[in-house]
Amino acid sequence: MDLAIRAIILYCFVIFVMRAVGRRELSSLTAIDLVLLIVMGDAIQQGLTQDDYSVTGAVIVVSTFAVLQVASAYLGFRSRKLRAVLEGRPVVLIDNGRLVEENLRRHRLTADDVAEEMRLQQIMSFSDLRWAILEANGRISFIERKSLQDAAS
């Protein structure tokens, strides 16, 4: 039972850390980010199992994580408020061709970061955009002015 309780505590801690780190950073991992995630995983494993190296202990921990993940997904599906806490909400980065500085600061993004994503999607200017939206999964969606005009005609 001790393993399951530690797994629940560490699961909640990992969810908190992932939300605090921010979605943009998680969607574009660098080499150092990957190494840090591996080290973090090892540290979590040590905190979970301490001196228990048994197969039974591993099964308990993995099963507890699986149950918590399914329960979180289900609760997020059932509750819009909880979904916002667990997954986040989309955030407008560009509105009518202008950067929303407050939202960029809050998500630790620069105009250069947004411009880089725009270039990857062959969008050359902020003024070409109606909106740029940072999605809950960390990707940026772009809605161009001309695509809205094409849809209206």
Image (tube, grey):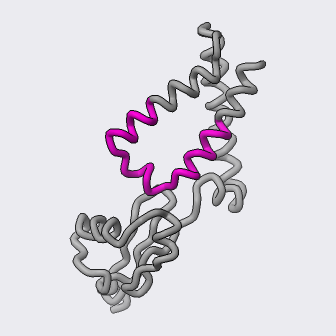
Residue lying furthest bottom in this view? 153
Residue 97 x %, y %: 37, 85
Position of residue 38 measured from the top left corner of the image (x, y, whole percent):
44, 30
Q: Quadrant of the N terminus?
A: top right
Q: State the predominant SS element of the stretch in magenta.
A: helix
Q: Position of residue 139 (x, y in %)?
A: 41, 60
Which residue of the protein is positioned furthest toward the right in this rendering?
A: 1
- Magenta region: which residues? 11-38
Q: Residue at x 38, y 37 (%)?
A: 34
Identify the residue shown where x is 44% and y is 74%.
93
Q: State yes or no: residue 19 in magenta.
A: yes
Residue 94: in sight, yes or no? yes
Q: Quadrant of residue 79?
A: bottom right
Query: Residue placed at 29% from the left, 71% from the top?
Result: 115
Q: Is 125 positioned to the left or the right of 143 in the image? A: left
Check residue 80 for magenta coloring: no
Residue at 51 percent of width and 29 percent of height: 41
Relative to the observer, which residue lies in front, 121 or 10? 10
> Is 117 left or right of 10, judged from the image as shown?
left
